[in-house]
Amino acid sequence: MTASFSEERSAEIVAGSFADTTDPRLKQVLTSLVSHLHAFVKDVELTETEWQHAIDFLTAVGHKCDDTRQEFVLLSDVLGVSMLVDAINHRAQADSTDSTVLGPFHLVDSPPRELGDDISLDGLGDACVFAGRVRSADGTPLPGAQVDVWQANGAGFYDVQQPDLQPERNLRGLFTTDTEGRFWLRTVVPRYYPIPDDGPVGTLLNATGRHPNRPAHIHVIAGAEGHFPVTTHVFVEGSPYLDSDAVFGVKESLIRPVTDVDDVKLATHYGTENPFRLIEFDIVLDTRQ
Ligand code: BEZ
Ligand code: FE
């Protein structure tokens, strides 16, 4: 028979109910969850009104989710859980480019593009070149590496947020590095933007005096054969909100300047007018052992 419930032994009693769980990982996770959850409820001495408020909040988070909106992931993002899970799971790739959150605006089927293509199909924003080199941790360049890029436009919106205003697949592209591991493409300088804040997560940010903004960034997923892929961003140096990203995604190592370049030969190579703006971002991938 289950022991009779008491405030003192609550976690122990509930954890005991998992005794017959055959999956050892599930048992470990549930036991730890109950232990921390009960400790939290005791710590704050949760009132019944607050408990009901929490239930209503989580219900609203669920109702906000659909095929294109994932409010639970957004909640995880603003509580720093997404970045913590990312950090724990990428300790092994210590020599590679730092990772950061994926975010909700990635499309699994980015359009394959040629090196030098312009991914800004609406031309909204200040033109710039985004270029770099993909290398293995020992410095060897990685030809044939895949570089998947996506970003918001000069007004701070992704194509999927404005299907009636922006061309389909605006500011997205899947590039393949050349024989020296290099990639380059034409785009616009990204702008800071707010994460979707018209749902319960926005209400939470508002109630805690937090803003919803993310600093200007370009998303990148880079991968190459025999290497761990990296999901990351390059952040624009000097952007507002670099020190208060709503989802805690900023790492110093990922901040790059937008430089003004006056070099006719380089401009010709990148297929752009001279002078031009340039964001350079080299990417290092760890080998799979
Ligand atoms: C993004 O950078 O696209 C993003 C990341 C987390 C939450 C919302 C947006
Ligand atoms: Fe983003």
Image (spheres, rainbow, N blue to C red):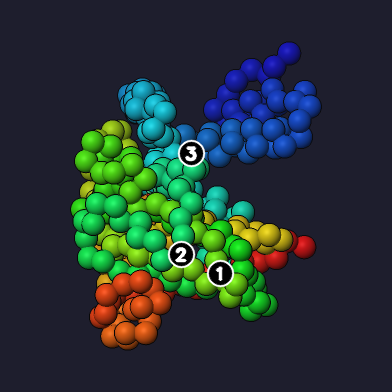
Q: Are marks 2 and 3 in contact (CB under 8 Å)?
A: no
Residue 128 picture location, percent across and down: 30, 69
Question: Mark 3 sits on what residue?
Answer: 40
Q: Secondary structure at mark 1?
A: loop
Q: Residue at x 30, y 33 (%)?
A: 200
Mark 1 surroundings within 10 Å by alpha-carbon count, few (fewer than 14), some (14 through 19), many (20 or more): some
Judging depth in this view, the residue of 21 and 42 nearest the camera is: 21
Give how far apart the Cα atoms at labels 2 and 3 are: 52 Å
Residue 33 picture location, percent across and down: 59, 36
Q: Residue at x 42, y 28 (%)?
A: 67
Q: Are marks 2 and 1 in contact (CB under 8 Å)?
A: yes
Task: Locate the C terminus and report the quarter of the image it occupies.
Answer: bottom right
Q: Quadrant of residue 32?
A: top right
Question: Mark 2 sits on what residue?
Answer: 115
Q: Name the front one of labels 3 and 1.
A: 1
Evaluate whether residue 66 shows in this view: yes
Give the vertical position of 23 relative to 264 (above or below): above
Give how far apart the Cα atoms at labels 2 and 1 are: 8 Å
Q: Secondary structure at mark 2?
A: loop
Question: Mark 1 sits on what residue?
Answer: 178
Judging depth in this view, the residue of 107 and 208 nearest the camera is: 107
Mark 3 surroundings within 10 Å by alpha-carbon count, few (fewer than 14), some (14 through 19), many (20 or more): few
Task: Locate the N terminus and report the quarter of the image it occupies.
Answer: top right
Give the vertical position of 177 relative to 72 (above or below): below
Q: Amino acid at mark 1?
A: Asp
